[in-house]
Image (cartoon, helix red, strand yellow):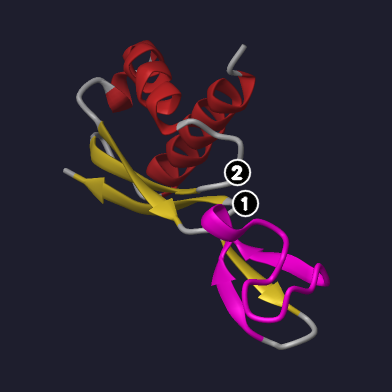
Amino acid sequence: MPMHELGTIYYVIDTVEKLAAENDLKEVASITLEVGEVSGIIPEYLSDFWLFARKKTELFQETELKIEPIHAVTYCQDCRQTYPTIPQGKICPYCGSGNTFLVTGNEYNIKEIEAC
């Protein structure tokens, strides 16, 4: 069951509602989310949940949800190089070391809120 996505959508709604109240916004045209490639969040599920959840509040009736990927990047502590995580995994393609860690790609952020 896609619970990460549902929780993420409700977090976004709560956060943007607070910002809208603080800034006296009556409508939000769009919200842009950045979603990490290895965050465990499935963008298609976010979009589906958004269409359902936005109808529950006046502020988001027509708000578009835009999703941008955050590419997963891993850092090798032995050779000090970074590389794309998805095609390579944990083993460094430059030196073969497993002494690596994820730098980006596991997070999600509210990047932008466009008000009407």
Span of residues in magenta: 81-104
Q: Farthest residue toward the right?
A: 99
At a point 38% along the width and 42% down the height, the residue shown is 20
Q: Quadrant of residue 43?
A: top left
Residue in the foreground of this view, choosing between 109 and 2: 2
Is 38 displayed left or right of 35 in the figure?
Answer: right
At mark 2, the secondary structure is: loop
Is 81 displayed left or right of 43 in the figure?
Answer: right
Q: Position of residue 75 (x, y in %)?
A: 68, 75
Q: Alpha-carbon neighbours of circle 2 within 10 Å: few (<14), some, or many (≥20)?
A: some
In primary-sequence order, the first of circles 2 and 1 is: 2
**In the image, is residue 71 above or below residue 61?**
below
Q: Alpha-carbon neighbours of circle 1 within 10 Å: few (<14), some, or many (≥20)?
A: some
- Numbered badge on residue 1: none
Amino acid under label 1?
Answer: Asn
Residue in the foreground of this view, choosing between 70 and 5: 70
Q: Farthest residue toward the left?
A: 116
**Residue where numbered disc 2 is placed:** 39
Quarter of the picture containing the C terminus is top left
**In the image, is residue 70 above or below residue 75?**
above
Q: Farthest residue toward the bottom?
A: 79
Q: Circles 2 and 1: CB distance less than 8 Å? A: yes
At a point 54% along the width and 26% down the height, the residue shown is 5
Amino acid under label 2?
Answer: Ser
Q: Position of residue 80 (x, y in %)?
A: 70, 87
Q: Position of residue 9 (x, y in %)?
A: 49, 28
Q: Position of residue 54 (x, y in %)?
A: 35, 19
**In the image, is residue 26 above or below residue 38?**
above
At a point 25% along the width and 20% down the height, the residue shown is 61
Is 30 displayed left or right of 70 in the figure?
Answer: left
**Residue where numbered disc 1 is placed:** 106
